[in-house]
Image (cartoon, rainbow, N blue to C red):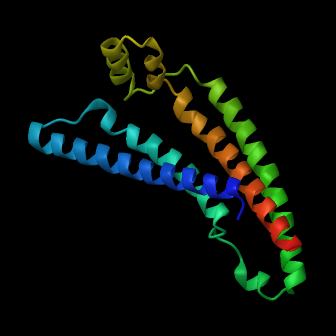
Amino acid sequence: MSSFSAVLRRICAFGAGLSMALVFGVILFNSLRRYLVGRSVPWGEELPIYLTIYGVMFGLALAYLTDSHIRFAVVVDLLSEKVRAGLALVSDGVTIVTGIALTWAGVVFGLRRADRDASGLTQAADALADATGITALEWLGRMGPWQFAIAFGGALLTLAAIARLIDRLSEGRT
């Protein structure tokens, strides 16, 4: 395994774990507040959805890096080792192209709707910006950062496929 692949694995594992922990924390906080105070926080319904999408994107790349993604092993197991190795290289190439296309589509999608309000997050983002004096935090109340998850996931998938391709090619030389 290349050092690039190892670093990318750590980043993806940390990102997926952090996303899950944040989703759990937000849902726990929102549930406790709902039952103790009688009402939820405005951002407690929407934020876990967006955090989950980022978590899925980190997990998608991690699954590809560790070669633990869903595949048709029954069919592949019938092939010879040489054909299987060639198919893995082709699969990595197709995944790189798919990741690039997903990144591009995510950028286009995110830019097209970036200024729309994320209804449950607008007030919280504005309050955070007012409290800190950092006006850029108002952007968290818009759809752009959350729709960017598609482009982010495509970029991570592309990097994961490149890392797997490098690892497979280096394994073939040794």
Q: Who's the residue at 77% across and 54% down the image?
A: 162
Q: How many marks?
A: 0
> Residue 120 appears in which quarter of the rendering?
top left
11 displayed left or right of 33: right
76 displayed left or right of 68: right
> Residue 115 appears in which quarter of the rendering?
top right
- The image shows residue 154, relative to residue 66, as above or below, that is above
In the image shown, does 67 or 74 lie closer to the viewer?
A: 67
Q: Who's the residue at 74% across and 48% down the image?
A: 99
Locate residue 87, reporting x and y percent.
85, 72
- The image shows residue 101, relative to residue 41, as above or below, that is below
In the image shown, does 80 or 38 lie closer to the viewer?
A: 80
The quadrant the C terminus occupies is bottom right
Locate residue 13, reporting x and y percent.
52, 56
- The image shows residue 24, relative to residue 104, as above or below, that is below
> Residue 110 appears in which quarter of the rendering?
top right
